[in-house]
Amino acid sequence: MAEKIKNLINGDWVDAVSGNTLESINPADTYDVVGIVPKSGREDVNKAVDAARKAYESWRLVPAPRRGEIIFKAAELLRKRKQELGELVTREMGKVLPEGLGDVQEAIDMAYYMAGEGRRLSGETVPSELPNKDCKSIRVPIGVFALITPWNFPTAIPAWKMLPALICGNTVVFKPSSYTPVCSARLVEILVEAGMPKGVINLVHGTGEDVGEYLATHPDIDGVSFTGSTGVGERLARICGPDREVSCEMGGKNAIIVMDDGNLELAVEGAIWGGFGTTGQRCTAASRVVVHHLVYERFLDMFTKVALRLRLGNGLLKTTDVGPLINEAQMKKVLDYIEIGKKEGARLVIGGKACTEGGCAKGYFIEPTIFADVEPKMRIAQEEIFGPVVSVIKTNDLNDAIRIVNGVKYGLSSSIYTQDVNRSVVAERDIDTGIVYINASTIGAEIQLPFGGTKKSGLGHREAGGRGGALDMFTKWKVIYRDFSGKLQKAQIDKG
């Protein structure tokens, strides 16, 4: 029986004004309807933004440690319900259960981390150049944020956005992906149960066309945080204009470099995880592997043998290694890119077709696919595919490998496998990506450091924690000078 999900507006769970609905489908079994959600429109957005605007005036004055206590309680609730929430992620999005549980764990980690920020949110106190005067800078909230999230991390990414926004004293209108709305609703339910006042969080379901763009450009929205495709992110940045904060975390065409002195067994593990984990549906997926010519054939043989052992199926089954694509449109897009790779002259080593038998018969499955003899300028080596397709590219030396890695429009994540510390230092210095891994895959970011990329991978502030992370997105600086001398003092003039 499909679950009926509602919008949350000003503390009330309500249907869309129109009464229209959407279905959320299990991508591993299209006969399984996970939930029925509102297909919202502009009137629903208007009500949600109005509620958030009104709630902001009181929420911003709640002491940050108190806001942190609510988020800490949400962390505890998430931890207690991790198993059921992880199973829901797997059922609604398709990733295998260990990854579904990992998705929820990221939300737990972020909740604990941001709860602690309630007692930090640190600014700076510095000495004045004049007597009997002090100076400080503090973080203050910005206002009402539109948060627009994708389907591939339906619990983690909403938590990445909502929790820092809330701890900083902002209110939010949250528009999750229409492909994974039930997971997002569960997260919001937990925050409400933890004690979030009405209107502080507002949840509006619907499509990007009907809801997302209108919400992002609403005149009473002060900031927009978006994760999704580069095309949509760039359009949002243009139409939102300069009068609001905008942060867009977008695509990637990430690469692993394997040098001739690298641990090949470890590199193969990293390439398997990076290329086929989450069925390649990560912005940090390793869709390119750039291999030194001296070990190219050996690596390709090892990589292929391991990939052939990967088992497709429903992610809730312990025997499954790789789950489905999110929907039919994404499956068609990936199959189209496979045909493009063939026509470009790349050598199809394994895979290359949909799986429609056995446990795959009711879902959107594509076999793990490896192309060899790929030229760096081929479309399959340049464009984000977002599926289980990996291009293996031969390189002459480290400088050539770095040139290949940098030779795309994206700059999110990268990796190098080498035992030479000097090579690793050159790579981390010269690779133009926001994240660099040494002897690890392109996947594995931790929430206490900022997350994001260069070039077409990101616009605006980074996500997650640490300096330059989400707190900078969701606050603005205020500088305060207090003069207790009892007389007019003129900085720079009296000093002389």
Image (cartoon, rainbow, N blue to C red):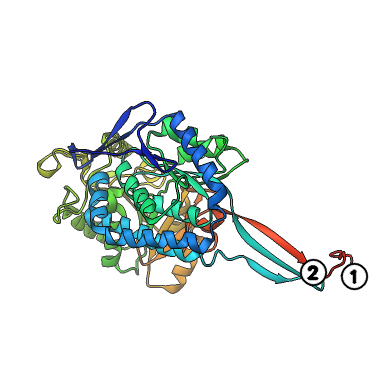
Residue 24: x %, y % from top left? 27, 37
| Foreground pick, 260 / 285 | 285
Q: Residue at x 41, y 55 (%)?
A: 195
The quarter of the image holding the N terminus is top left
Q: Are marks 2 and 1 in contact (CB under 8 Å)?
A: no
Q: Is residue 75 above or below residue 337?
A: below
Q: Is residue 367 above or below residue 42?
A: below
Which numbered marker is on residue 450? none
Measure the C-alpha gap from mark 2 to mark 1.
20 Å
Asked if one can make out residue 465 in the rendered structure from this viewpoint, the answer is no
Q: Are there few (<14), some (14-19), or many (20+) residues within 10 Å of tag 1?
A: few
Q: Amino acid at mark 1?
A: Gly
| Foreground pick, 69 / 407 | 69
Write down the residue under mark 1: 496
Residue 401: x %, y % from top left? 43, 57
Along the horizontal axis of the image, is 8 left or right of 57? left
Secondary element at image label 1: loop
| Foreground pick, 402 / 386 | 386
Residue 222: x %, y % from top left? 57, 43
Q: Residue furthest left?
A: 358
Q: Earlier in the sequence, mark 2 or mark 1?
A: 2
Which numbered marker is on residue 484? 2
| Foreground pick, 76 / 366 | 76
Asked if one can make out residue 120 in the rendered structure from this viewpoint, the answer is yes
Q: Amino acid at mark 2?
A: Phe
Q: Are there few (<14), some (14-19), or many (20+) residues within 10 Å of tag 2?
A: few
Q: Is residue 359 above or below residue 306?
A: above
Residue depth check, mark 2 versus mark 1: number of the one nearer the observer = 2
